[in-house]
Image: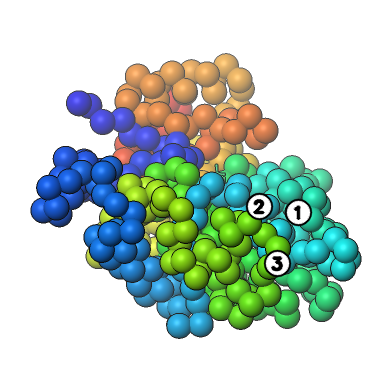
Amino acid sequence: MQRKINFNAGPATLPMEVLQEAAAAVTEYNGTGMSILELPHRGKEFVAIVEESKAIVKDLCELGDDYEVLWLHGGGRQQFFMLPMNFLDKEHDDAAGYIDSGHWSEEALEYATHYGDVQVLTSSKESNYSVLPAWPHTVPAQLKYVHFTSNNTIYGTQFRNIPKCNVPLVADMSSDIFCGRMNYTNCAIFYAAVQKNLGTPGVALVAIRKDMLAMCNKELPPMLSYAAQARENSILNTANVFGIYTSLLMLRWTQKKGIDAIEKENKEKANLLYDTIDKSKVFTGVVKKKADRSMMNVCFTADSEEREKDFLKLCADNNIIGVKGHRSVGGFRVSLYNAMGLDDVTVLCDLMKTFEKI
Ligand SMILES: *Cc1c(COP(=O)(O)O)cnc(C)c1O
């Protein structure tokens, strides 16, 4: 097999050692005489997978015992409605604040309007999300929570610091969790669809401060209640055994490499690509403000549609896929998640330099 250099935004490239270990477990899991695909979800082997994965998440995020870690179904979007369902009640005129920094935060706030009053605290929609909105100076104290998207996958902007907030802060960290050191404990809740930095689609990682569990809506079906999921250790129904196992393999890989080494490499990859773009006469970065630029997703355009097509073809001819930008932005988007190697980013940058000379 010739493996593609895969810059897709998600599902994203995974480390070969994780793929090989997952593949081996499909034949036999850990001397059990069974495939991971056949493993009982309430058996001791799977409970051990859940426990180890929770411990690594807590270690990587420096969380204390005041946090619970959950593995839930439904990827990122299920959190868009599970969150307001748990904490907002229309009959009590409950309100939540949303920071609108791109498509995903917009979709999250739209979902929330079904369950309560939504206040958009700040937005950069008018500039087509090519900058981060200013963080709100004041947050009304009656808000049940404030939601923001730490990395804007489609537009290539990223809040690199998680600020403190006077109401419970909730972060969608789907596309930048574990990209480097962050103040995770400034969040009451953070969640991530795992198919970018942490595994295969369909699963969501949720970390929730335990005081929030007491505030969850008690009328919900248990599947949609954070409190009920926490009580059942995320094994309320048949859990996504293989998906969670793949996330455990990614967590072990992340822990072995170390967050600081990962951050250093992510900065090197991003600097190399942004530098190539900034020095280019053909390519132009979409996000002009350097402080707003994402380490994970880099968006840029070429000087004509013709040239964009030509460059896409050159990439395809060189075994590179996943560089086409989202249709709402156009141009190119290159995703530099944790599992993407510096050598592969170098191949792309060299190709960009060659293309300029054609
Ligand atoms: C990918 C992504 C999602 C969507 O995840 P799904 O699992 O497809 O629902 C949500 N938020 C952000 C920031 C993302 O990058």
Q: Nearer the viewer, mark 3 or mark 2?
A: 3
Question: Residue 80: which numbered mark, if any?
Answer: 2
Residue 69 relative to residue 242: left or right: right
Tell whether circle 3 marks a residue whose Cβ is less than 8 angstroms from ligand 1. Answer: no
x 47%, y 58%: residue:
236
**Image coordinates for residue 188, horizontal then vertical, percent:** 61, 74
Which residue does the numbered mark 3 point to in the structure image?
Answer: 217
In the image, 148 versus 264, the foreground residue is: 148
Identify which residue, 129 or 85, lies in the foreground: 85
Residue positioned 76% across, 71% down in the render: 144
The kind of residue on which mark 1 rests is: Ala
Q: CA distance from mark 3 to mark 2?
A: 16 Å
Quarter occupied by the N terminus? top left
Does the beta carbon of the residue at mark 2 sit less than 8 Å from ligand 1?
Answer: yes
Residue 264 horizontal/vertical position (percent) = 36, 63
Can residue 260 be seen from the camera position used here? no
Alpha carbon separation for disc pair 1 and 3: 14 Å
Image quadrant where residue 252 sits: bottom left
Q: Circle 2 — which element?
A: helix
Mark 2 belongs to which amino acid?
Phe
Q: Which quadrant of the figure contains the C terminus?
A: top left
Count every numbered label the image shows and give the total.
3
* Residue at point 56%, 78% (across, down): 210
Whether pointer 2 and pointer 1 mark residues with C-beta atoms closer than 8 Å, the reply is yes
Q: Are marks 1 and 3 in contact (CB under 8 Å)?
A: no
Quick one: SS at disc 3? loop
Residue type (three-letter) at the residue carrying disc 3: Asn
Q: Which image quarter: residue 226?
A: bottom right
Q: Which mark is residue 112?
A: 1
